[in-house]
Structures are given as C-alpha cells and as structure tokens.
Image (tube, helix red, strand yellow):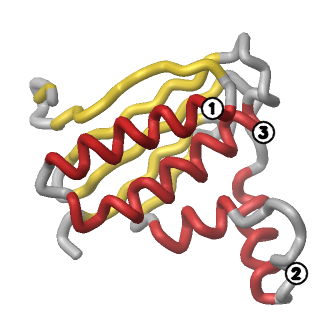
Amino acid sequence: MITTSNNIDVFFETEITAELENIDKIDEKVATVLTLSKLKRITFVIRLLLREALLNAVLHGSKRNAKNKIKFKLFVEDSYVCLKVVDAGKGFNWHQQLLDSFKAVQGDVISKIGGRGLFLMKAYADEITYNQRGNSLLLKKSINL
C-alpha cells in the first residue's frame, strides 16, 4: 500500500492489455489485497464492481484489442473504497446508456445477453462517475456499511 501526499491510500494500481483473461488476474490480486486488509466485509461488492467495470472496458471500450491498454486503480479516499478504470476507447453516451439499462430492468427486458453491467454497478456502488467522453469510470463504495 502507498499513501500519497493528500492521504489517499493506494492499494493496487496497474495497466493491462484489453484481454478477458486479465480480468481474472486483477480480480485475484484485488481479492488478496482486500482479504488482508480491514475491508474483507465488502470484498464481494468490490470484486463485482471491478469485474463489471473491467469487462465493459475490455469488450466495449477496447473492443478486445490486445494492443489497447486499460488502467486500473484501487484506492481508499475518505471513507470510500474507490475503483478507477480508464480505457483507450472513444467513450460512449453513458447518460443514455444508464437510462436505457434502468428502463430495461423496469420493463423486464433484462433477459437479453448483456446490458446488466451498468445496472449492477449503479445498484452496488454508492457513487458512479464517468468523464465527459465516457472512457474513464470512478466507482465508490462506502467503507462504513
């Protein structure tokens, strides 16, 4: 763990190629870090958020192109565990996509393949923030459950 000058504890930071098998590798490392820390009780939620965020970055942002890189960072800021995922993709209209994902769930159209990632992230994260372009995601989960 690294503590920055503005008191942000960085547990894990890496850059991966946009390949599905790398999601499992990051997940295993994060699971180990969380299990060894005092954050064990929220491990399931953090791992769910990380898998959904990385899956979207690999499949949609980077189009599974192994030449593209995805940056991942796990850190604690204030009373939140934070996940930051940045891909090299062109981004997307996340406002509309979030709205569509909620409409699909309300209309019980969730049975289609895909389309649940944003809904799950919104349901489990306390805060979800994209940059304007839509290729950088910050998820926050409160440590104080």
- Residue 37, position as x, y percentages in the image: 14, 49
- Residue 120, position as x, y percentages in the image: 59, 68
Q: Residues within 10 Å of mark 3 (few under 14, many from 20)?
A: some
Question: Is the residue 50 above or below the residue 21 in the image?
Answer: below
Does the residue at mark 3 contact the one at mark 2 (Cβ under 8 Å)? no
Residue to which mark 2 is pinned: 109
Quadrant of the rendered structure where residue 59 is?
top right
In three-dimensional space, the C-alpha distance between marks 3 and 2, rounded to whole angstroms, equals: 20 Å
* Amino acid on which the number 3 mark rests in the picture: His
Residue to which mark 3 is pinned: 60
Give the mark count.
Answer: 3
Question: Is the residue 63 above or below the residue 116 in the image?
Answer: above
In three-dimensional space, the C-alpha distance between marks 3 and 1, rounded to whole angstroms, equals: 16 Å
Residue to which mark 1 is pinned: 21
Which quadrant is the N terminus positioned in? top left
Q: Residue at x 77, y 48 (%)?
A: 93
Quadrant of the rendered structure where residue 33 is?
top left
* Amino acid on which the number 2 mark rests in the picture: Val
Which quadrant is the C terminus positioned in? bottom left
Which comes sooner in the sequence, label 3 or label 1? 1
Which comes sooner in the sequence, label 3 or label 2? 3
